[in-house]
Amino acid sequence: MTGTGSALRELIAAPHPDHAPLPPAVPVGTCVRAVRGVPYGEVEGGRPLELDLWLPGGDRPEPVPLVLFVHGGAWRRGRRDDMGLRTRDWVPGPFARIAAAGFAVACADYRLSGEATFPAPLDDLRAALRWLTLRAAELGVDPGRVVVWGESAGGHLASLLALTHTAPALAGAVIWYAPSDLTAARGRFTPEDAGTPEAALLGAAPVTVPERARAASPLALVRAGAPPFLLVHGEADSMVARSHGESLAAALEEAGTPVELWTVPDADHGWYGLPDARVEEIFLRSLAFAGTVTA
């Protein structure tokens, strides 16, 4: 390509996410604004990575804390604006509720296992944090008061982010029914099976890539000085054994990290089987935890 053609390509390309204007905000109810489809990162040869923002309305003299939400879907599917089966019909939705409580919320895309293998999705979440920090003043958020909140596979990635991101450290992590160990058999998972979602995430059966499996296991990365964790897991979870949460809680406690473990009786994966009031209680307790660690 000629020099002129190369210059033209740069000229007509979409603005880089670091300085691209934000899409217009849309009111949600009376006290929340939503900004959807905000590019936060570029991947060579791949789709742009986007996030949705839910921002508290009104004039606020001080920056607000931020919840970074990470969706589930076995690392191979899912939508960034989906908190799971039991919240899909809420009006207002869960993210509008969090924003109405005084948080900004960012729901981020990440590359799925059909697009790239680990550590790609974790790298994407780090890129989202970088972008949110870069644009913090414009968004009115405090990058020093960030809680990562994830469910299922998203909870696994949220745990990894909380345990490995140190500049600045996150304020806390809310983890719903997430895997914590990709190295050993638990429940229905066996590391020798190349057909599992875990194998798709790693690019091979976990037993054949032990170093990568360990690097993708929050249980192996527990450290002193990690942010506080709230771990919530159904006692009847048939997809991700509750021992994942129990083992992670024990390791965090041994390392001196503040941790709350709540195992919910009669709850299957995604809070299936619980009455609506019980799901609401889990959500509100999780929101209260986020408020406590960002106060």
Image (cartoon, grey):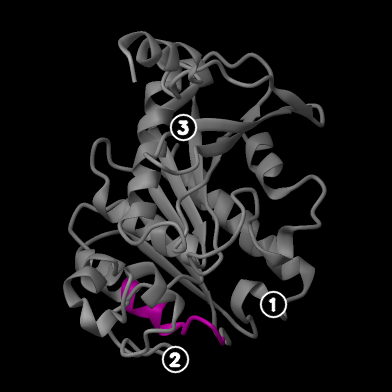
Disc number at residue 187? Answer: 2
Q: Which mark lies nearer to you, 1 or 2?
A: 2
Whether residue 105 is visible: no
Sequence-wise, the earlier of marks 3 and 2 is 3
Q: Which mark lies nearer to you, 3 or 2?
A: 3
Sequence-wise, the earlier of marks 3 and 1 is 3
- The amino acid on which the numbered mark 2 sits, given as a three-letter code, is Gly
SS for callout 2: loop
Is residue 246 located in the magenta-colored stretch of the structure? yes
Disc number at residue 40? Answer: 3
Is residue 193 located in the magenta-colored stretch of the structure? no
What percent of the width, then of the height, locates residue 142?
43, 27
**Above-or-below relation of 277 to 99:** below
**Above-or-below relation of 1 to 253:** above
- The amino acid on which the numbered mark 3 sits, given as a three-letter code, is Tyr
Over which residues does the magenta segment extend? 238-248
Sequence-wise, the earlier of marks 1 and 2 is 2
Image quarter in which the N terminus is found: top left
Image quarter in which the C terminus is found: top left
According to the picture, the residue beneath numbered tag 1 turns out to be 272
Disc number at residue 295? Answer: none
Q: Which mark lies nearer to you, 3 or 1?
A: 3
Task: Name the residue rendered at 30%, 66% in the picture.
Answer: 218
Nearest the eye: 129 or 264: 129
Disc 2 crowd, CA 10 A, few/some/many (<14, 14-19, 20+): some
